[in-house]
C-alpha cells in the first residue's frame, strides 16, 4: 500500500510539472499521434477494400466458371453449358424461373475524375435473374436499363470515381455509344464499381456469340452448396468449377490487402522507431531536469521501483494522449473517404471507402502504448539508478 501511495504521489507530481516541459512533451505527443494516424490510415485502406469484396458475397450464392479459371476474365462457357447449369436441382426459383444469371465481364476505358487518366472500368452483362441472385441491388437514381437496348446502369462508386457516367450521358461500348439511364447501390460491395447492361446486347457488341463467362446462381440454401457442386462437377456434359461467392471475393481481396497491410506496417514501424527516440529524448530530458528532485525523494525514503513506475506512467500518459489524438485524426480524415484501386485479379478498377474500424483504432492506441513503454523504460531505469549524493550536489 505504501508503495502504491509513493507511485501515486510521484505520478501526480510529474503530471503537475508537465507545463514546465510543454515543448518536449508536445513533441512526443504529436510524434506518436503521427505514427498512429499513418498506421490506421494505411490499414483502413486494406480494411475498406476487404469490406467491399466480402460484403458482396453470400453463402447461398455460387459462381460457376470454366474449370481451371482463376477469374471470370479467363473463363468461357457456351450457351448450352449455361442452360445445363441453370436447370440443375438445388437452385432457388421464383415463379418457376431459375435464379441463375449467365454473365459477361468486359473492360472499357473511362477517365478518372481526379486525374483525367484512363482507367479500366468493368462492364458486366447480366441476365434478368441477376438482381434476384445478388439481392442487394437498388436503383437510386434514374431507372433500370431496358432489356434489348444499348443502355447501362452504373454503380454509385463508378459514377463518383469516373467521368462520363452521369444520367443521360453516353459511354463508348465496342464501336457504339450506350446511354447511362440509372445509378445503383449494392450495399457498398464490389458491384458499385461496375457498369451493368443486358448480356444479350453485350454479346454481339464484343463478338462473343452465344458464350458467357460465368453463371451466378442463388441456391435454395447455403447447405445445398456441396450437393450442387457435386452435380455439376460430375456431369459429363460440363467442364466447370464451382465456388461460393464469398470464397471467390475473399480470394480476390487477398493479394492487395496483404500488400497494403505489409507496406503499412513497414512504414508505421519505421516511423515508430523515430517516435521511440522522440519519447526517449522527452523522458531523458524530464529526468535530467529533475535530478535533484528525484535524489531528494529517494533520500526521503521513496523507493527506486516507485520512481521507475512513475516515470513509466508519465511516458504512458503522453503516449496514450498521442494515441487517442492520432486515432481521432485518422478517423476524421480517412473513414468513409472513397477512392479506387486496381484489382490485380481482374485488371479492373474497384471503388471502395476507407474503413476505420474500432479494431483499427484499438490497434493504433496499443501501438502508441508500446512506443510509450519503450520510450520511458530506459529513462526510468536511469532515474532509479542516480547516485543520491552526486545528484544532490548538482545545481
Image: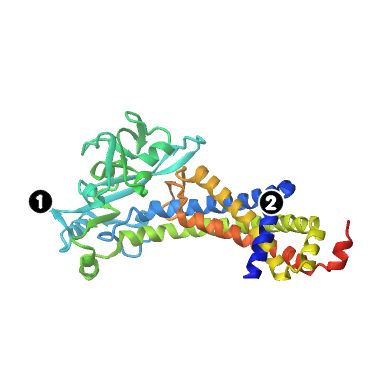
The tag earlier along the polypeptide, 1 or 2, is 2
- Residue at 40% x, 32% y: name it: 164
From the image, tell me which residue sits under label 1: 95
User: Based on the displayed image, in which of its 4 quarters is residue 54 positioned?
Assistant: bottom left
Give the crowd class for mark 2: few <14, some 14-19, many >=20 residues within 10 Å: few
Of tags 1 and 2, the one toward the viewer is 2
Say above or below: 319 vs 351.
below
| Secondary structure of the residue carrying numbered label 1 | loop
Residue 16 is tagged as 2
Query: In this view of the protein, can residue 267 be seen by the observer?
Result: no
User: Based on the displayed image, in which of its 4 quarters is residue 143 positioned?
Assistant: top left
Q: x, y (%) of residue 52?
A: 39, 51
- Residue at 43% x, 34% y: name it: 163
Q: x, y (%) of residue 242?
A: 28, 64
Question: Can you say which quadrant of the picture contains the C terminus?
Answer: bottom right
Horizontal relation, residue 139 to residue 4: left or right:
left
Between 127 and 209, the one nearer to me in the picture: 127
Q: x, y (%) of residue 82?
A: 22, 56
Query: In this view of the protein, can residue 251 be seen by the observer?
Result: yes
Between 275 and 39, the one nearer to me in the picture: 275
Amino acid at each position: 500500500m505504501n508503495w502504491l501511495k509513493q507511485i501515486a504521489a510521484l505520478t501526480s507530481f510529474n503530471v503537475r510539472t508537465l507545463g514546465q516541459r510543454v515543448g518536449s512533451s508536445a513533441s512526443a505527443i504529436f510524434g506518436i499521434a503521427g505514427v498512429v494516424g499513418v498506421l490506421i490510415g494505411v490499414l483502413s485502406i486494406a480494411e475498406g477494400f476487404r469490406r467491399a469484396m466480402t460484403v458482396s458475397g453470400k453463402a447461398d450464392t455460387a459462381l460457376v466458371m470454366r474449370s481451371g479459371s482463376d477469374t471470370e476474365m479467363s473463363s468461357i462457357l457456351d450457351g448450352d453449358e449455361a442452360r445445363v447449369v441453370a436447370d440443375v436441382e438445388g437452385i432457388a426459383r421464383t415463379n418457376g424461373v431459375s435464379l441463375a444469371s449467365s454473365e459477361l465481364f468486359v473492360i472499357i476505358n473511362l477517365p478518372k475524375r481526379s486525374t483525367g487518366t484512363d482507367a479500366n472500368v468493368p462492364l458486366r452483362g447480366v441476365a434478368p435473374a441477376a438482381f434476384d441472385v445478388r439481392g442487394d441491388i437498388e436503383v437510386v437514381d434514374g431507372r433500370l436499363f431496358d432489356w434489348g437496348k444499348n443502355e447501362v446502369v452504373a454503380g454509385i462508386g463508378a459514377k463518383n470515381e469516373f467521368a462520363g457516367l452521369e444520367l443521360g450521358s453516353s459511354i463508348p461500348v465496342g464501336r457504339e455509344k450506350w446511354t447511362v439511364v440509372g445509378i445503383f447501390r449494392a450495399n457498398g460491395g464490389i458491384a458499385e464499381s461496375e457498369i451493368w447492361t443486358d448480356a444479350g446486347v453485350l454479346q454481339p457488341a464484343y463478338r462473343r456469340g452465344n458464350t458467357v463467362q460465368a453463371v451466378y446462381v442463388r441456391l435454395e440454401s447455403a447447405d445445398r452448396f456441396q450437393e450442387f457442386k457435386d452435380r455439376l462437377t460430375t456431369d459429363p456434359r460440363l467442364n466447370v468449377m464451382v465456388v461460393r461467392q464469398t470464397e471467390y471475393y475473399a480470394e480476390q481481396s487477398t493479394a492487395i490487402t496483404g500488400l497494403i497491410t505489409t507496406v503499412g506496417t513497414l512504414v508505421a514501424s519505421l516511423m515508430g522507431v523515430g517516435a521511440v527516440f522522440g519519447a526517449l529524448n522527452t523522458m531523458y530530458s524530464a529526468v535530467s531536469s529533475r535530478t535533484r528532485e528525484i535524489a531528494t525523494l529517494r533520500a526521503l525514503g521513496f523507493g527506486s521501483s516507485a520512481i521507475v513506475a512513475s516515470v513509466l506512467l508519465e511516458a504512458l500518459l503522453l503516449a496514450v494522449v498521442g494515441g487517442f489524438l492520432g486515432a481521432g485524426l485518422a478517423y476524421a480524415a480517412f473513414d468513409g473517404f472513397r477512392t479506387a484501386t486496381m484489382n490485380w485479379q481482374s485488371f479492373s478498377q474497384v471503388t471502395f471507402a476507407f474503413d476505420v474500424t474500432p479494431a483499427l483504432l484499438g490497434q493504433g492506441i496499443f501501438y502508441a502504448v508500446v512506443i510509450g513503454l519503450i520510450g520511458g523504460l530506459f529513462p526510468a531505469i536511469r532515474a532509479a539508478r542516480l547516485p543520491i549524493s552526486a545528484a544532490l550536489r548538482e545545481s
